[in-house]
Amino acid sequence: MGKKNIHDSTPISRIINRFSESHTTSVNKLIHYITIPLVSFSILAIVWAIPFPYLGFLGKYNGFVNWASFLIAGTVYYYYRMSPFLTYGILLLVFAYSAMIVSLEKFHLQGGPELHIIPMAILLPALLAQVAGHRSERSTPDAASSFRSLLDGPLWLMNILFRKVGILKSR
């Protein structure tokens, strides 16, 4: 497979550039390399844990559709519009997250904590670490861009990963 290049005028390049501008120090980058997957996993797991109503028309598929299904569909659609290529990596990540969430559900059935407890215990320290990481930067992002970072962070990280392994050309 040949290397793919993302041009600077594309929406994904603007997202990557904007995110990179607020993540310049090695400390902040390292913190975000670790916490972006933790935050995105935690949010998906917490949404997964929200009770979903029984819908008769789903038949035997009740239990396979939940609120996280809509979150996944919406974010994958957004990611696909930004970069179809990076979306493949995001989908692999979603599959891995889903497998971990199902494992947490099974753990709960065997006497472990409810599904939302462990992700909540991961989410809060990860978000606090991100705030601490931004203190090493020249400027800290505002609340609106912080919310946007929850969505764009996985794209930024996938872009970095694809470049490191040579799937995407470096700039």
Image: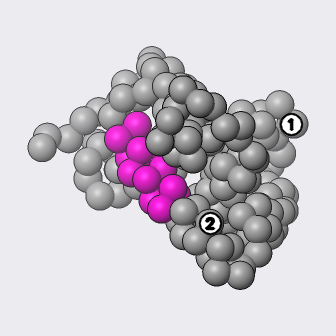
x%, y% of residue 122? Answer: 74, 68
Please say whether residue 93 is one of the residues in the magenta stretch.
yes
What residue type is disc 1 on?
Asp
At 26% from the left edge and 48% from the top edge, which residue is drawn?
167
At 48% from the left edge and 50% from the top edge, which residue is drawn?
94
Label 2 residue SS: helix
On screen, 149 above or below 128?
A: above
The residue segment tinted magenta is: 87-99
Q: Main secondary structure of the magenta part?
A: helix
On screen, 110 above or below 72?
A: below
Count of numbered tags: 2
Quadrant housing residue 39: bottom right
Q: Reading the chain from its start, which is encountered first: label 1 or label 2?
A: 2
Instruction: Looking at this view, name the residue that lies furthest to the top.
Output: 9
Label 1, on which residue?
A: 142
x%, y% of residue 80? Answer: 43, 27
Q: How far is mark 1 from mark 2, CA to CA? A: 35 Å
**Figure quadrant of the C terminus:** top left
Label 2, on which residue?
A: 105
At 39% from the left edge and 51% from the top edge, which residue is drawn?
92
Is residue 20 in view? no
